[in-house]
Image: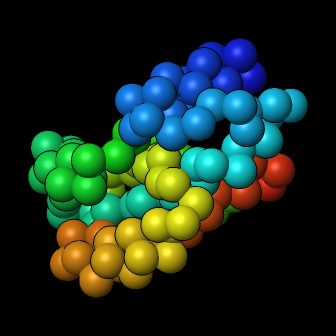
Amino acid sequence: MLIARSLFMIFAALALNLPTAAFEHDKFPVLRELAVTFKKQARRQEAEEVLQAYNLPFREGADSSRGKMYYYNTGPKFILHVPKDKLTGVAAELKKHPLVFEVYEPDWTKQKD
């Protein structure tokens, strides 16, 4: 899993023409992850279109820090890979979108139910 995640981040950086020298020991100072959770009524295709508008790499999924009830009571979930310098702006824009339920930086160290 760690190797696949590292390879994904390197390919994402290459696709964005970002320097890859910073990728060492699973530390990514160039790219940061944002967990984007959509509202229950949002369809997966609609959610993907919202994220595609940012022209940034993303994948389906979420961290498990919110628990099962959060998972079942919300809509599609994605991890968006954002350059560090654009993190605040992209997060603020996404939070304003009517289909978005929540945007946060995932915490991979926490695991609920």
**From this viewpoint, is residue 60 visible?**
no
**Position of residue 3 in the picture relative to residue 17 (left or right):** right
How is the rendered protein coloured? Answer: rainbow
Please name whichever residue, 38 or 4, is drawn nearer the observer in this view of the structure.
4
Tell me if 15 is positioned left or right of 71 in this view: left
Can residue 85 be seen?
A: yes
Q: Relative to 22, is 101 above or below? A: below
- Residue 38, position in %: x, y? 32, 62
**102 vs 12: above or below:** below
Residue drawn at the location 48% of the way across and 54% of the way down = 82
At 32% from the left edge and 77% from the top edge, which residue is drawn? 93
The mark tally for this picture is 0
Percent position (x, y) of residue 44? 21, 45
Q: Nearer the viewer, residue 70 or 48?
A: 48
| Residue 16 found in image quarter | top left
* Position of the N terminus by quadrant: top right
Residue placed furthest toward the right: 25
Residue 33 x, y percent position in the rendering: 57, 52
- x 59%, y 36%: residue: 19
Q: Is residue 3 left or right of residue 55?
A: right
Direction from residue 19 to residue 44 in the image, left or right: left
The x and y percentages for residue 64 are: 65, 50
